[in-house]
Amino acid sequence: MTEEVKHTPGPWVHEGHLIYGPEHVLSKHPNGRVLIAEVIEGSYRADPHLDGGADRFDFCSKADVRLIANAPELLYALGVITGVLDDVVNGNGVIGGEDMALEVARTALAHARGETP
């Protein structure tokens, strides 16, 4: 994959509800990493389009944190799968890499779900 990276490079890690990117010399955080995002805890976001507003709108912030923190790995896995499928669909005569692509995808999904691959 030769695409230019347009996001903060991984790996990203999470501490509680904060998600950090790579270490950086200018970071003032004790862990030396760049802050990527903070996921709001609880279920107090109001949405006027939902019946009951905030009382009816719940989300699992811990799962959201895992998913966001694993975004670079998921993006990489999607790139690997796309590369393999491009070769197969376009009939480039290059068959192979399916096992590796499947393993990369399974590992990325397990990490995003908080499971051990």
Image: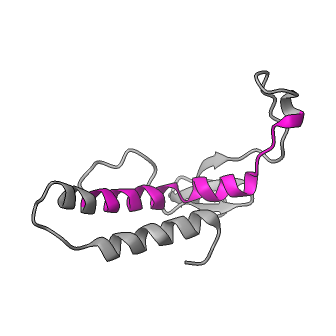
In which quadrant will I find the N terminus? bottom left
Image-quadrant location for residue 67:
bottom right
Where is 78 relative to 96, above or below?
above
Residue 85 % position (x, y): 26, 59
Q: Is residue 70 magenta?
A: yes
- Apparent side of residue 106 relative to residue 18 in the rendered image (left or right): left
Residue 115 % position (x, y): 63, 73
- Apparent side of residue 77 relative to residue 113 in the rendered image (left or right): left
In which quadrant will I find the C terminus? bottom right
In the rendered image, the residue lying farthest to the top is 48
Q: Is residue 68 magenta?
A: yes
Say which residue appears at 54% left-offset and 56% top-offset: 21
Say which residue appears at 60% left-offset and 78% top-offset: 116
Say which residue appears at 34% left-offset and 57% top-offset: 79
Front-lying residue, 14 or 25? 14
Residue 51 % position (x, y): 84, 26
Describe the colour scheme in one phrase.
Answer: one colour
Where is 27 relative to 47, above or below?
below
- Apparent side of residue 11 relative to residue 44 in the rendered image (left or right): left
Majority secondary structure in the magenta region? helix
Front-lying residue, 93 or 17? 93
Front-lying residue, 83 or 35? 83
Q: Which residues are magenta?
A: 55-83
Say which residue appears at 23% left-offset and 54% top-offset: 2
Q: How many marks?
A: 0
Front-lying residue, 62 or 95? 95
In the rendered image, the residue lying farthest to the left is 93
Image-quadrant location for residue 54:
top right
Image-quadrant location for residue 86:
bottom left
